[in-house]
Amino acid sequence: MISERLYELAFAFRKTRLWGFLWESEVFAVRLSGGRIGYVSVQGALKKQCGLELYIGEEGLESFRTMGRVNQLRMRPMEYQEYVLQMQCLRCGFVNRGQMAENEWEEAREYARTHGIRTSGKRAYPQFEKFQPNCCPWQLQTQEEQEDLCEALAGAIELAGLLRGRRPSELGLGNLTEQAQELFMLERRKGGFVQTRTRIPGFEGKQWPRPGNCNDISIANLKRMKRLGVWECALIRFPDPVWDEEGEIPCFPVVFLAVEASTRFMLPVPPVEYYDQAPEQLLNQFMDVLLAENVCPAEVMVRDERTGAFLEDFCKRLKIRFVQKRDLEALNDAEDDFLDHFNMSEEEEIESIVAMLNQLMAKGDEELEKLPQEIVDQLEMLVKQDFLPDMLKRRLNRVYHFDRLEKEEGSRQEARSYVISVSPCTGCYRHIRISAGSSFLQLHKAILNSFDMEDRASHAFFMDNAKWSGRDCYYKEGIESHYRPTKKYRLTHASLYKGMKFKYIYDFHQELVFQCRVLQVLAEDTGTPAVVRSKGEWYPCEDGE
């Protein structure tokens, strides 16, 4: 809940129209409580948005400088997004009603009504947001954040008074450039503000995360493998934000693109949510995929310093040739395809698949036999998941014998099982051991049994860990005819791996969401699904309770 003091200062700041006197680059400083320095940029001179942004400390100031270096016309889309997501500030902006959540608007309207403030016209309502790197803008989280914004707004109101009849340069205000050494600052003392100046801190440059302790067993196994291919690699941000729990700030996970330059095959490395805090998690997943694909790079090429920091030590340990080059053609194409996938409508995705299948059908058997193994593996997956027309399935089985291989694989997969953690809320979970050959319907029943629930409603699994996403999901048979039914698909179809997260939803009316995570992949079979560990009690609320 926003304090009355913050609303009071926000509406008072709006009346100053300070954006009519200052450009966004004419930053000034305010000394905050505890001696911290806040750097204030007034937004609105260009009429894009009106308000005030507060960047705290050296990191905040550097994020403002980073935004100043953004040039959308000269950047690749993912590079542009990466820069924009480094914003680190608190914002008081003025917006229209339609840009606010219902509770935000009701709270602001109530304050204005009780204090006799008119809210007619454009951008009439204050909105308070927190921007932190690699996350969506979100509501203020702490009382200290509200107090910091109060101090910044009070300083801006003071500055508006000082600028009456004077030019900014007369107060010593100027553009924050790379060459600037000092800034105009307001410091609160008894009786009001005092005008001073503060030295602009230098910045040593971004220190990119480097993986710490990685899986030494994986390193040892990769050392024994033959080096194959030139792999072009980059770390990029997932185009869509994700979050695990209600109220959690949505973040943009990191995706590791690794593309073989000649075949254009891309490794299926799962994204991670908190790369900056634990880069070794992503490195271990990358090594797991390399081992699963039975490949170790002969050469790795990266185009930026962050990816270089991620892979440099890995390459040294395995004696892989390491090259940094700005323009990598195969990687750029893979990135474009990755973006196109997320920008595609469902109809466009289907059209793209149909076009690819038509090209395959036009090839002779000998041409199909010469396709790279990576593409053959993709085709095998499509055949197993029953995505292809019967005519094409029969032809591919005739050429590659997928049906025989599937029977052999099925016999091998019988001796494999998973331990899956299923949690409906913090502090409560069940660890369920289940055979890899079990269907999703059997996992659904095992989950309900573990929480002593009866099977009376619909259910679905979302394997990309985003509820209702529609990208990789399994539904109760008869609920969604165009999605895969849980009764007909086994866990092996989802290619589960250790650490993989996915969501299970039971009862679409109540929307009971369970967070699932694969804890172990065991090289032995499990008969009846069993709960191997349990913590906490949980009972779903009935309607009206």
Image (cartoon, rainbow, N blue to C red):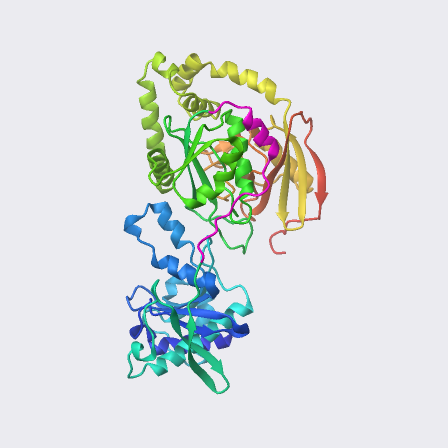
The spot of residue 337 in percent (x, y) is 35, 36
Helix, strand or loop: magenta stretch = loop
- Can residue 267 be seen in this snapshot? yes
**Of 246 and 475, the residue lying toward us:** 246
The spot of residue 112 in percent (x, y) is 43, 76
**Of 501 and 255, the residue lying toward us:** 255
Which region of the structure is painted magenta?
A: 204-227
The spot of residue 103 in percent (x, y) is 48, 65
| Vertical relation: 53 (above or below) 414 | below
| Vertical relation: 513 (above or below) 106 | above
**Of 96 and 219, the residue lying toward us:** 219
Residue occupying image coordinates x 47% and y 66%: 56
- Can residue 474 be seen in this snapshot? no
Q: Is residue 206 magenta?
A: yes
Classify residue 495 as left or right of residue 369: right
Please identify the quarter of the rendering in which residue 11 is found: bottom left
| Vertical relation: 28 (above or below) 324 | below
How many marks on residues? Answer: 0
User: Where the C terminus falls, by quadrant?
Assistant: bottom right
| Vertical relation: 361 (above or below) 83 | above
Classify residue 537 as left or right of residue 326: right
Q: Is residue 252 magenta?
A: no
Residue occupying image coordinates x 48% and y 26%: 385
The spot of residue 271 in percent (x, y) is 49, 41
**Of 442 and 518, the residue lying toward us:** 518
Residue occupying image coordinates x 33% and y 35%: 329
Classify residue 402 as left or right of residue 160: right
